[in-house]
Image (spheres, grey):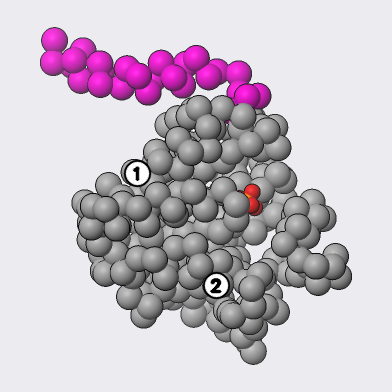
């Protein structure tokens, strides 16, 4: 896992947007896994900026979102579908036919989950998966105890997640209790992973998932078993890590390996 500690949210957003932009420039028909939440908003704003100012082309990109609240219609203002169009899609030249987001109000969610998995497979798998992290260690809505082999399915949300999500809803009773989410098994099949996190309230969970033991109780720890993970944190989210000096040194000196080999 490569860990980049940035000085603030703005820098975290710029660094992560740059990583995504480079992947799109390398492969124009990139299959991009996307996340919602407060964390990636700045990253999406940066991507919009790169699109507008440097012509980053999304016309062939295919996107798959991680999750959606069960029961919310796509146009509901708290749906992740609404979030994605407001914060990213309507500002770039992505083809709406290439956008995949779980549909919260689908009649047969189980059949839908199987279909969603099949669409990811048909697209050739996810090239780059963008992730945030919940305070309980979830990636997508894979709450504590989710199997590392799990696929797209319906998941009951954990108490802490429901409390965290409540800020977007008028009443506690309106906060959804269930979501459609891709699984840890699905995420682990992505070729590359980019996880971003910011803020002091993520410091404990970042220390646990980066430096703690692998456990399904903190599902982000599964990423320790993935071969290509970029983690971009702001300094608050990184504040409880123990080996920050080492991570910084590795990043600053990664080119010196080439020099050593060439010597
Ligand atoms: P946040 O959510 O970006 O709003 O903190 C992250 C998550 O729950 O995955």
Residue at (81%, 72%) from the top-left corner?
A: 174
Disc 2 packing (10 Å; few <14; some 14–19; many ≥20): many
Residue at (64%, 89%) from the top-left corner?
A: 107
* Residue 64, placed above or below residue 27: below
Q: Main secondary structure of the magenta part?
A: helix
User: Is 248 contained in the magenta span?
Assistant: yes
Quadrant including the C terminus? top left
Q: Residue furthest front?
A: 53
Depth check: give the residue in front, 119 or 24: 24
Q: Secondary structure at mark 1?
A: helix
Q: Which residues are magenta?
A: 238-263
Q: Does mark 1's beta carbon lie closer than 8 Å to ligand 1?
A: no
Residue 148 in view (yes/no)? no
The x and y percentages for residue 27 are: 23, 56
Label 1, label 2: how far apart the Cα atoms are = 24 Å
Mark 1 — residue?
A: 19
């Amino acid at each position: 896992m490569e860990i980049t500690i940035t000085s603030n949210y703005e820098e975290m957003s710029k660094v992560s947007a740059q990583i995504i932009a480079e992947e799109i420039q390398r492969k124009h028909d990139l299959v991009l896994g996307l996340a919602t939440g407060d964390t990636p908003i700045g990253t999406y704003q940066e991507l919009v900026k790169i699109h507008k100012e440097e012509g980053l082309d999304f016309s062939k990109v295919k996107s798959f979102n991680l999750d959606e609240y069960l029961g919310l219609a796509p146009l509901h203002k708290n749906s992740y579908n609404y979030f994605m169009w407001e914060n990213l899609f309507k500002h770039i030249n992505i083809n709406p036919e290439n956008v995949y987001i779980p549909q919260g109000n689908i009649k047969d969610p189980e059949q839908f989950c199987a279909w969603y998995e099949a669409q990811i497979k048909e697209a050739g798998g996810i090239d780059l998966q963008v992730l945030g992290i919940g305070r309980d260690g979830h990636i997508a809505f894979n709450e504590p105890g989710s199997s590392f082999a799990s696929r797209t399915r319906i998941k009951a949300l954990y108490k802490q997640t429901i409390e965290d999500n409540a800020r977007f809803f008028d009443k506690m009773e309106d906060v959804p209790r269930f979501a459609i989410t891709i699984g840890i098994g699905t995420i682990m099949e992505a070729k590359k992973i980019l996880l971003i996190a910011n803020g002091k309230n993520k410091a404990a969970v970042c220390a646990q998932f980066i430096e703690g033991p692998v456990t399904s109780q903190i599902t982000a720890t599964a990423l320790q078993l993935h071969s290509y993970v970029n983690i971009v944190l702001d300094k608050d989210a990184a504040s409880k890590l123990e080996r920050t000096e080492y991570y910084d040194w590795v990043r600053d000196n990664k080119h010196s390996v080439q020099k050593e080999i060439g010597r």
